[in-house]
Image (cartoon, rainbow, N blue to C red):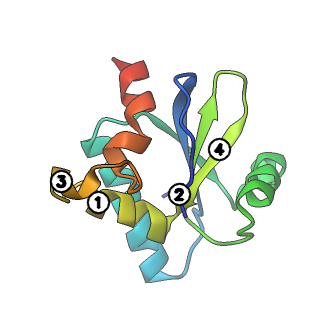
Amino acid sequence: MYLSLSLSLSPSLSLSLSLSLSLSLSLSLQVRQRKLVAAMESKKVPFTEIDGSDPEQKDVRGQLFELSGLRGKYPQVFLKDEGGQYSFVGDWDEFEGLLDNDALPPEVLIGGDIKTFTAVFACCTAAAE
């Protein structure tokens, strides 16, 4: 496997990225990475996986770590706009929270203070259609 949210979304964001680790001895990390990929695929969100253990990805990995402030923590999720700029969505816990928030009743989501997977990745699914 390769592979709070005060994120302001822009219609120009069209690609999601998963920064993960292909060489992991941690079973829990492998499970999180598989769940992340499964969620993205099941919700039809196009994404690119960046292997954090690949020496050829060192520069982009460093750029993503600097943006997130979470060096060596996997997986992490980012959005990349058409100009090549990245936005940090969150680590696994925040990503899982977005998935959980999709199940909240609509009346709880009124006001827009609670981010959901559907809202955060709407830009990516719209761009893929």
Q: Could you give the CA–CA distance between mark 1 and mark 2, rounded to whole angstroms?
A: 12 Å
Give the farthest residue toward the front.
111
Question: What's the residue at 41%, 69% (across, down)?
Answer: 32
Q: Amino acid at mark 4?
A: Ser
Q: Is residue 76 visible?
A: no
Q: Amino acid at mark 3?
A: Glu
Q: Amino acid at mark 1?
A: Asn
Question: What's the residue at 75%, 66% (across, down)?
Answer: 69
Quadrant of residue 20 within the rendered picture: bottom right
Q: To which residue does mark 3 refer? A: 107
Q: To which residue does mark 4 refer? A: 87
Question: What's the residue at 43%, 60% (across, down)?
Answer: 95
Q: Amino acid at mark 2?
A: Leu
Question: What's the residue at 40%, 53% (across, down)?
Answer: 115
> In what element is the residue under mark 4?
strand
Give the farthest residue toward the top.
129
> In what element is the residue under mark 1?
helix
* Rendered location of residue 31, percent (x, y): 38, 72
Q: To which residue does mark 1 refer? A: 101
Q: Could you give the CA–CA distance between mark 1 and mark 3, rounded to whole angstroms?
A: 12 Å
> In what element is the residue under mark 2?
loop
> In what element is the residue under mark 3?
helix
* Rendered location of residue 121, percent (x, y): 41, 39
Q: Vertical placement of 91 versus 77: above or below?
A: below
Label whose residue precedes the other's in the sequence (2 or 4) = 2
Q: To which residue does mark 2 refer? A: 5
